[in-house]
C-alpha cells in the first residue's frame, strides 16, 4: 500500500491567532516571582535544548526570576552543546518544581518523550506546548504546534516576537543551533525563505556561524571517529526492502560505546554517513540504550514516510526523519521495521 505524498497536504495547520493570544496571555499574566518550568524531550538534541534555553533567556529578559529548565534522564548536556548560553537555567529533573505556575514543553511530540516529567502536565497551573512534529499528539493545554515550522525554535522565536522580547546574541546563539540542527545546516526540505530570514536575523546579532557549525557538527573525539568506522563497516544494504526502494542499516551496542570509551550521544550523528547510501531510500541506525532496549533513528531520501513506521512502532517524528524506542533483540527490532516499511512507501 502507498500513502499520499505531502502537498496533497493532510498535515494539520499551525497555531491560530487564538492559540498565539492564549500563549502570550499565559506568560504576560505571570508575576515576576512565578515559578516557570521549561522542559524538552529525552536525549535532547540541538533543537530541544536550543529552543528551550533561548526561550528561557527571553523569559528572563521579561523579568521572570524563578525559571528552571530540565529534561528527563541523566542531567548531562551532550558535549557539542556545553557552551550554549542559558545552561545556568538547567537543573536535574529531580530538582524541578513539582507544581510550577507555568510549564512550557519544547520539541516533544508526545507525553512519552517527557519521561518522568510528564506528571507536571497535571500538576502545573498551565501547560504550554511548543513543537513542530506532525505526529504531535495534542497533549498539554495551550498548543503552539506548527508542523510546517523547520524547528521548534521557529515557533519559540515567533512567540518571543509577540511578547516584544528583542533577540540578543545569547538568545540568537541558542535559536541558531536549534535551526541549523533541525535543517541539517540549511540543507533539508524544510529550509524555506522564512528559515533563511530568521537565520539572517540571528546572524545579525553578531554570531560566528563557522565556529558554531564546527562545534556542533564537525567535532568529535577520535574514539567516536573509530567507533563510526566500525559501525559503518558492518552496515547492511537490503535493496528489496521498502517495496524495492531499499534499506540500509547498522547498529551500535553499549559494549561498542564502552570499548571506545564514548557516551551514548556521540551516536546521534552516526545516521548522517549511513543516510548517504545511494542504493537505499531508507536508512536506519539502531542504538542500544539498555539491555533489550534500542533507540532507533530512521531517515528517508523522499520515497518513504518514515514517521508512519515510527508511529506504528510507538515513536514519532517527521516524514523524512523519525524515531522510536524498540524492545527485544536487535533482530526483532529490525524485523519490525522491515514489516512496517512496505506500507509507508509514498505514491510517486
Ligand atoms: P533522531 O533520529 O535524530 O533521534 O530523531 C529524528 C526525529 O524523530 C526527531 O524529530 C525526533 O524528535 C523523533 N524521534 C526520535 N525518537 C523518537 C521517539 O522515541 N519517539 C518519538 N515520538 N519521536 C522520536
Ligand atoms: Mn525539532
Image (spheres, grey):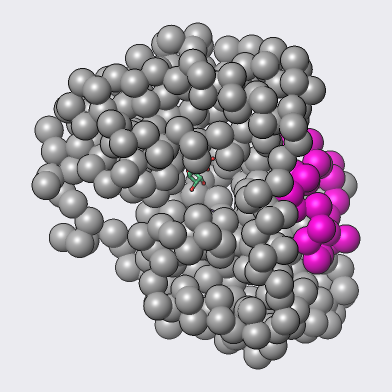
Name the spot of residue 269 as percent of width and height, x first: 58, 39
What segment carries the magenta color? 73-94
The image quarter containing residue 165 is: bottom right
Reply yes or no: does residue 74 show up in magenta.
yes
Q: Quadrant of the N terminus?
A: top left
The mark total stands at 0
Residue 102: quarter of image = bottom right
Judge whether residue 39 can be spotted in this image: no
Residue 270: quadrant of the picture: top right
* Residue 294, percent from left and from top: 55, 22
- Expressed as whole percent of the image width and height from the top left, the position of residue 279 reads 28, 31
144 relative position to 58: left or right: left
Q: Which residue corresponds to the image point at 81% horizontal and 76% vertical from the top-left?
A: 60
Residue 171 coordinates in the image, percent (x, y): 72, 74
Q: Nearer the viewer, residue 258 or 128?
A: 258
Instruction: Considering the whole magenta stretch, tell me its main secondary structure.
Output: loop
Q: Residue at x 33, y 48 (%)?
A: 319
Relative to 100, residue 285 above or below: above
Amino acid at each position: 500500500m502507498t500513502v499520499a505524498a505531502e502537498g496533497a497536504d493532510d498535515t494539520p495547520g499551525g497555531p491560530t491567532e487564538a492559540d498565539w493570544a492564549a500563549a502570550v496571555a499565559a506568560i504576560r499574566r505571570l508575576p515576576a516571582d512565578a515559578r516557570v518550568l521549561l522542559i524538552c524531550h529525552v536525549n535532547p538534541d540541538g533543537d530541544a535544548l536550543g529552543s528551550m534555553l533561548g526561550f528561557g533567556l527571553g523569559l528572563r529578559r521579561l523579568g521572570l526570576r524563578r525559571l528552571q529548565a530540565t529534561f528527563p534522564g541523566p542531567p548531562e548536556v551532550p558535549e557539542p552543546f556545553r557552551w550554549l548560553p542559558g545552561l545556568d537555567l538547567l537543573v536535574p529533573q529531580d530538582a524541578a518544581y513539582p507544581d510550577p505556575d507555568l510549564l512550557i514543553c519544547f520539541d516533544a511530540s508526545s507525553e512519552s518523550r517527557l519521561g518522568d516529567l510528564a506528571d507536571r502536565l497535571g500538576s502545573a497551573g498551565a501547560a504550554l506546548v511548543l513543537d513542530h512534529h506532525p505526529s504531535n499528539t495534542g497533549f498539554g493545554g495551550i498548543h503552539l504546534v506548527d508542523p510546517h515550522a523547520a524547528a521548534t525554535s521557529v515557533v519559540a522565536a515567533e512567540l518571543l516576537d509577540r511578547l516584544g522580547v528583542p533577540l540578543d546574541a545569547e538568545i540568537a546563539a541558542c535559536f541558531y543551533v536549534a535551526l541549523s540542527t533541525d535543517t541539517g545546516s540549511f540543507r533539508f526540505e524544510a529550509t524555506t525563505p522564512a528559515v533563511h530570514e530568521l537565520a539572517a536575523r540571528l546572524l545579525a546579532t553578531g554570531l560566528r556561524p563557522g565556529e558554531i557549525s564546527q562545534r556542533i557538527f564537525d567535532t568529535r573525539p577520535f574514539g567516536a571517529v573509530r567507533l563510526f568506522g566500525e559501525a559503518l563497516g558492518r552496515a547492511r544494504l537490503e535493496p528489496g526492502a521498502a517495496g524495492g526502494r531499499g534499506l540500509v542499516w547498522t547498529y551500535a551496542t553499549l559494549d561498542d560505546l564502552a570499548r571506545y570509551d564514548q557516551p551514548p550521544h556521540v551516536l546521534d550523528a552516526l545516521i548522517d554517513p549511513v543516510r548517504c547510501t545511494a542504493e537505499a531510500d531508507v536508512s536506519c541506525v539502531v542504538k542500544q540504550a539498555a539491555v533489550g532496549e534500542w533507540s532507533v533513528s530512521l531517515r528517508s531520501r523522499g520515497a518513504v514516510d518514515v514517521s508512519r513506521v515510527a508511529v506504528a512502532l510507538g515513536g514519532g517524528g517527521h516524514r523524512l526523519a523519525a524515531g522510536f524506542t524498540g524492545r527485544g533483540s536487535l533482530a526483532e527490532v529490525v524485523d519490525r521495521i522491515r514489516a512496517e516499511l512496505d506500507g509507508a512507501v509514498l505514491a510517486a
